[in-house]
């Protein structure tokens, strides 16, 4: 079968890492699932914006919708506001295509130095289910008296019963297939309305999963426990903002943001799902050829899984694990001197 993949490298290190992700995914799909990936590279980025005054063409959403999946690098650039780059391409995509599950695994691979003491490989094995379409990132609010002394900004969180329920159910289903433990991140002691609703829905949904050990945890305590005892977590379910913050933390305790992968999934498959590394465009290392491509490669692995190519998905993950365990090729974020290309080549060779 042929799978149509839209590839948006985007800005900064985005295009640098996404090329290796495409290459690895293509080889894995062909070799282990006898499947073909047809890539459609789209130049949508800050450069595109500078030429055309928009992040994507007028019919961009229709173009994207014709694909089976989207492989995405990163957007964001020092010379154009995130209000445009991130907010006119990435965030609307998650909402427009109803990619309400943002799945973000964190795993302590063998061969990666953990900043925490006495953690064995595999001891940290967490999947965060982050709500991806509403919550604190809903584009609701406004500013008055901009730049004046009496300036006011309002940013409203939008939480719906349906939105809370569907992400909670997705997370419980995942916990059932894993170690059967789920932590629901909350802050209902202070955010009584929105997080109050989240907790109410959690209490209802958990009744359908008596086989899963589940409990709520305040987000500040969760931040502490992710550092203090990350091995105590299995599946974490969180709102948009809390999930965003906790996944950078989970990435750091498992060695590097350069290893953190993610999937933005529309479970109904009405629209394409999107796969991207957790990291951004990293302007500080752009063009140096030292970005770690493994987060992008692992994200491409999540994409293969979503496309039903389970064997090649597993082989991507196993090959990354093998390269890390071997330890000869390491980018600077992992304490080595290897280039992006060395790392990409090592994974492709392992495949
Ligand atoms: P960032 O994730 O781009 O960088 C944070 C730090 O991690 C930097 O020191 C960077 O060098 C390092 N890093 C990131 N990815 C790496 C990799 N693959 N290998 C080695 N080191 C890596 O976050 P930052 O600097 O806060 O944001 C830069 C821009 O990216 C901003 O415009 C931001 O809005 C945007 N951004 C976009 C995202 C997306 O497109 N999904 C996600 C996060 C940020
Ligand atoms: Mg983030």
Image: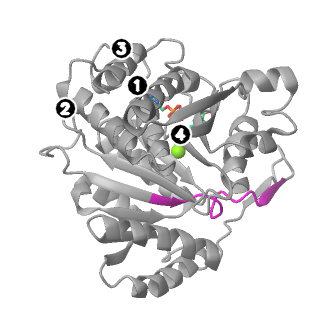
**Few, some or many C-alpha atoms within 10 Å of disc 3 (few <14, some 14-19, many ≥20)?**
some
Q: Are marks 1 and 3 in contact (CB under 8 Å)?
A: no
**Few, some or many C-alpha atoms within 10 Å of disc 4 (few <14, some 14-19, many ≥20)?**
many
In the shown orientation, is residue 300 left or right of residue 2? left
**CA gap, disc 3 to disc 4?**
21 Å
Q: Is mark 1 within 8 Å of ligand 1?
A: yes
Q: Which residue is mark 3?
A: 342
Precedes in sequence: disc 2 or disc 4: 2
Res. 111 mark: 2
Q: Which residue is mark 1?
A: 292
**CA gap, disc 1 to disc 3?**
10 Å
Viewer-proximal residue, 292 or 81?
292
- On the rendered image, what quadrant is the N terminus found in? top right
| Element under disc 3 | helix
Res. 78 mark: none
Q: Quadrant of residue 241?
A: bottom right
Q: Which residues are magenta?
A: 129-143
Q: Percent position (x, y) of residue 51?
A: 84, 20
């Amino acid at each position: 079968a042929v799978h149509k993949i839209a590839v948006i490298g985007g800005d900064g290190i985005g295009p640098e890492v996404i090329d290796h992700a495409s290459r690895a995914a293509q080889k894995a799909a062909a070799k282990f699932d006898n499947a073909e990936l047809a890539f459609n590279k789209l130049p949508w980025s800050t450069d595109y914006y500078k030429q055309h005054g928009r992040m994507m063409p007028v019919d961009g959403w229709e173009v994207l919708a014709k694909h089976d999946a989207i492989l995405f690098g990163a957007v964001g650039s020092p010379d154009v506001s995130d209000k445009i780059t991130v907010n006119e391409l990435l965030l609307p995509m998650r909402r427009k295509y109803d990619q309400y599950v943002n799945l973000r695994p964190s795993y302590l691979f063998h061969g990666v130095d953990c900043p925490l003491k006495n953690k064995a490989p595999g001891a940290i094995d967490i999947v965060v289910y982050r709500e991806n379409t509403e919550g604190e990132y809903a584009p609701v609010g406004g500013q008055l008296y901009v730049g004046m002394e009496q300036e006011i900004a309002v940013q409203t969180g939008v939480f719906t019963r349906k939105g809370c329920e569907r992400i909670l159910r997705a997370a419980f289903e995942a916990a059932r297939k894993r170690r059967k433990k789920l932590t629901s991140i909350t802050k209902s002691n202070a955010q009584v309305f929105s997080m109050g609703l989240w907790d109410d829905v959690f209490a209802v949904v958990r009744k359908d999963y008596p086989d899963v050990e589940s409990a709520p945890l305040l987000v500040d305590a969760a931040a502490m426990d992710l550092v203090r005892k990350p091995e105590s977590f299995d599946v974490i379910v969180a709102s948009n903002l809390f999930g965003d913050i906790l996944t950078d933390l989970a990435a750091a305790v498992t060695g590097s943001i350069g290893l953190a992968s993610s999937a933005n999934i529309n479970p109904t498959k009405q629209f394409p799902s999107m796969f991207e590394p957790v990291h951004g465009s990293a302007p500080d290392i752009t063009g140096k050829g030292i970005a770690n491509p493994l987060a992008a490669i692992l994200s491409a692995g999540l994409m293969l899984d979503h496309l039903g190519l389970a064997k090649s998905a597993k082989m991507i993950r196993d090959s990354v694990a093998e390269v890390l365990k071997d330890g000869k090729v390491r980018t600077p974020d992992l304490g080595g001197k290897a280039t992006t290309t060395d790392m990409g080549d090592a994974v492709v060779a392992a495949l």
